Amino acid sequence: MVTYPGSFAGYLICSPDPEIDYIASQTVVVSVQQHNRVLATKLIEKIDVIGQFFELAFNYVELTGNIQLIIETHSVGNQFNKDNPITIDQLILDDLFTIPHLLMSGKLLNSNQQELDTGNVLWQSGQLIYTFNLPIVSNVGITNTGIST
């Protein structure tokens, strides 16, 4: 069986509300899914104002359709998650560095799977979901210029 390796990586930062008078860190679960099948998952702990890098390697089920990167709150305290939101500051897709329009394309869903917002901030209990069409290069606008060497 042929496998097709892929990877997602990024930098997560906890950005507490300026009025918070305690020091906290966040924990999230990051996973990659394709066709409702989990390809990789990782618990990222102790995310603070300095931030934390993560990387998930996986094998694609197939190279067409779409793939999802899901960042999910680990704390059940909704107020804690609101006071200490997580920002994804960098997103690397299959070794292609952060593309600004892709970084801001996450969809924030609450625990009832209702869409609350778009962007790169997980500011409530729930999931920040990025969906990418395959092949990945089609998302970043890499095109054939017709120039040959």
Image (cartoon, rainbow, N blue to C red):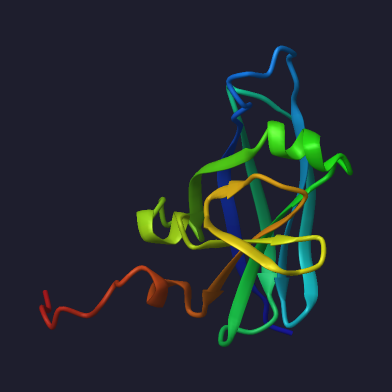
Q: Is residue 121 left or right of residue 43?
A: left
| Residue 14 percent location from the top left of the image | 63, 31
Residue appearing at x 57%, y 59% in the figure = 117
Q: How many marks?
A: 0
Q: Is residue 123 visible?
A: yes
The quarter holding residue 123 reads top right
The quarter of the picture where the N terminus appears is bottom right
Residue appearing at x 73%, y 83% in the figure = 35
| Residue 16 percent location from the top left of the image | 63, 26
The quarter of the picture where the C terminus appears is bottom left
Q: Is residue 61 above or below residue 96?
A: below
Residue appearing at x 57%, y 83% in the figure = 63
Q: Is residue 140 left or right of residue 56?
A: left
Q: Is residue 30 above or below residue 11?
A: below
Viewer-side residue, 126 vs 3: 126
Q: Is residue 38 above or below residue 2?
A: above
| Residue 2 percent location from the top left of the image | 68, 82
Viewer-side residue, 1 vs 40: 40
Q: Is residue 45 visible?
A: no
